[in-house]
Image (cartoon, rainbow, N blue to C red):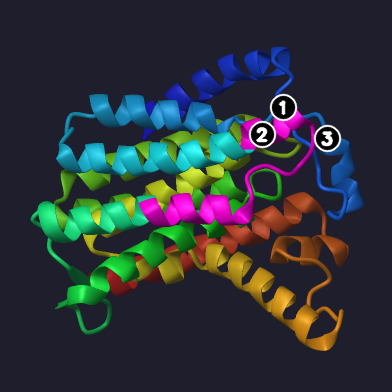
Amino acid sequence: MLLGLVASAVLTSLEIPILKSHQFKQYIREEGPQSHQKKSGTPTMGGIAIILALLVVTITGGYFTSESVVMLLVTLLFGGIGFLDDYIKVTAKHNLGLRAWQKLVLQILFAVGLAVYIARFSGYGASVFIPFVNKYVDFGFMYVPFIAFVVVAMANSVNLTDGLDGLCSGVTAIVSFTFALMGMKLGQGSPTIFSAALTGACLGFLVFNRHPAKLFMGDTGSMALGGAVASAAIMMKMEFFLVLAGLIYVMESLSVIIQVAYFKATGGKRIFRMSPIHHHFEMGGMEEQNVVLMFWGITFICCGLSYLIFIM
């Protein structure tokens, strides 16, 4: 974890001037909070440093296996989707990148590929650990769609969480550390090293991404983080723990779904002041850094509960 922190901090510090020199700047959506307009022009695509740090530390972490290759591949593929999205945005100089359906098709394709590999070729099979009853249940033919849903949902939920300085990197550091502890308890070396490296990479990035952020991770980072967290949980067969440990991710996604559904059903009315839900608190008068601290705190509590349930 410490090696990941150092690697990420060093790589991020080197990346910032490169991003600035290439004019890779964030374009803030006009319909977002007006207070965020001052962030326009901040370097983006900082997630590249997170991915590189994760790659280096996982490979040199002393437990590099085929599992490590799969988790890194998923991270790189989802990070690649985000990179394409970010690159289109910065070159076209607006906040619209890949179309939603294009991202979704690529996400589903990669997620199904992972699910098929795990079920058919990895030796892990189609079983999933069920909390509370503490049993592994074979999902059979439902395993592939289940895993595909988990990966795609996580990638998009983490992406939605990346809306405030330090929010996504901080939340993901706490979640990935929890899975590192689970992996250690299970005696699974590769997912443990990978999750610990991810924790360090997020913390190293947070040095520069905390408020006021010197750079943003962009979709390159958030998509990669979603793929990384999901793939580690899948390798451990701990998919259902993502719901509680990653409750903030769930809340962010549900707030958008509820807002859109209610808006359409009522002809323009809203439940939240703005979605995703972190903007709801901002629009209610909370300072950005206080919203971030609150969400970190919720994640810490949820991850603590997840680990307690895990060891019961």
Residue named by callout 1: 91
Q: Which residue is mark 3?
A: 40
> In the image, what residue occupies the spot 18% across and 32% down?
64
Residue located 62% across and 65% down the image: 252
| Circle 1 residues within 10 Å: few <14, some 14–19, many ≥20 | few
Extreme-left residue of the structure: 123
Q: Is residue 214 visible?
A: no
x%, y% of residue 212? 76, 36
Circle 3 Cα neighbour tier, 10 Å, few/some/many (<14 / 14–19 / ≥20): few
Q: Earlier in the sequence, mark 1 or mark 3?
A: 3
Identify the amino acid type marked 1. Answer: Thr
Nearest to the observer: residue 128 or residue 132: 128
Q: Are marks 1 and 2 in contact (CB under 8 Å)?
A: yes
Gap between marks 1 and 3 measured at Cα: 15 Å
> Marks 1 and 2, how far apart in space?
5 Å
Q: Element under label 2?
A: helix
Amino acid type assigned to the residue bearing label 3 in the image: Ser
46 left or right of 38? Answer: left
Residue 278 quadrant: bottom right
Write down the quadrant of residue 303 in the picture. Answer: bottom left
Q: Residue at x 36, y 35 (%)?
A: 1
Q: Quadrant of the C terminus?
A: bottom left
Tell me the element at label 3.
loop
- Residues rendered magenta in the picture: 86-109
Q: Between label 1 and label 3, give the one nearer the viewer.
A: 1
